[in-house]
Amino acid sequence: MKNYRITAKLLSPLMIQENRQSDTCQSILYLPGSTLRGALAAKFFLIRGGPEHKDFRSLFLDNSPRFPNLFPTDEKGSVLSRVLPMTSISCKRNSGFRGKDKHGVRDTLAASAASRIMQASANENFWICPECGEDMKPFPGFWNGNPGAPCKFEPTTLYHRHTGIDRDTGTVAPSIFFVTQVMADFRKDDKSEEYHEQYLSGDMFISGEQLEILETLIEDSLFAGADRTRGLGEIQLSLEEIPHPEVKLEDWNEIFKAKLKSSMGNNMPADALSGIYFSIKLESHAILADKFLRPHSDIEEFSSSDFKLILKMTKAQTVRGWQSAWNLPKPDDLSVAMGSVFLFQYNEDEPEKLENLLNELAVNGIGLRREEGFGRISVCDDLHIIDKEVI
Ligand SMILES: [Zn+2]
């Protein structure tokens, strides 16, 4: 298995419906893995054959790869975007990474963990903008994952307006008006005022055989998302091999503990800095279930006594979908939202075992419906160990 960056260039606006009601169409501003998988399967049916084809089985059914979410990226499509963790905050007046008129982004994981360990309320100044004194608010979205030169990726959105047509008269029906939001196939640069193409990116592990099948499906464009009959959702996919993700456990643990220590002050408990700290961030919604398949918000792989959950910052998210093959809605699932963060302390003396487990989870993910891109994780995010107050 090799790791590939999969990049989608938008050839027309893209609409991914957040819910199934057709009169309130807000688009999700990325391409979910389940939609990508569905679009590729539809293309297979169109040019290669039905679900009994051996290549279809190889790519979509038997040992299916985990199709990733594709997130907005830079103007060349060359960066693998990351989800901002729920611990990131920014000024409510001028939010954004530090720049001309942006007041910077701060990460709250170490400070929140310290107040949890000390069982004390957190320092209130931490949620105040150091630049202007206003409150800081959560800062969700996608970024380049590089604390040295941080950059947020925000696609341009457009609104399409439609009137309803009266079925009897064939003219505009009174009181019926739809507004649909779409992701534009261009992006306007705030600074230069130039227009760029809109790319989305994600990464996936795939075998040589699966790669060959996938390449036959992306020679020309394909369609994804809603309103395809109006020409929306045309994308051109490309693949490029990239290195495996690397878990930098040792360095991260050292730096994080130093941050924790400075947040805790003098009266910290004796075992507060023992063991190895590591964080898990959800790069996509994760459908987590207990052994009776009841939804919950714990990661089963870390439920043993070797691991102590220090802190989790999570949100619930309902996952909806459409099964094109059946032409029916998929059952709703309750998930833990992307961007959720878990912080653990590992107190056993087998760092290699831990590293192997984390590497395995970074590739294979957690929870259910992983082949549709749910349950993707990253380990030890660099944003949690930035050395500046804000970046
Ligand atoms: Zn501010």
Image (spheres, rainbow, N blue to C red):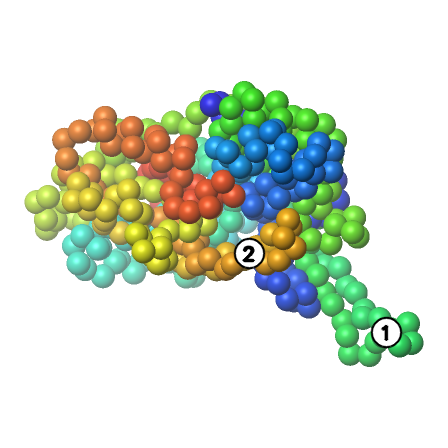
Residue 342, x across and y down, in percent:
31, 47
Q: Is residue 276 above or below residue 175?
A: above
Is residue 391 shown to the viewer in this render?
A: no
Quadrant housing residue 136:
bottom left
Mark 1 belongs to which amino acid? Arg
Label 1: element kind: loop
Mark 2 belongs to which amino acid? Lys
Count of number-bearing discs: 2
The residue nearer to you, when weighing 375 against 120, is 375
Residue 330 - label? 2
Q: Residue at x 56, y 36 (%)?
A: 60
Disc 1 crowd, CA 10 A, few/some/many (<14, 14-19, 20+): few
Q: Residue at x 53, y 37 (%)?
A: 61
Label 2: element kind: strand
Whether the residue under disc 1 has CB within 8 Å of ligand 1: no
Residue projecting furthest to the top: 208
Of tags 1 and 2, the one toward the viewer is 2
The residue nearer to you, when weighing 94 against 62, is 62
Q: Which is more N-terminal, label 2 or label 1?
A: 1
Residue 100, x across and y down, in percent:
55, 45
C-alpha gap between disc 1 and disc 2: 30 Å
Quadrant housing residue 120:
bottom left
Residue projecting furthest to the front: 52
Q: Residue at x 77, y 74 (%)?
A: 176
Residue 167 - label? 1
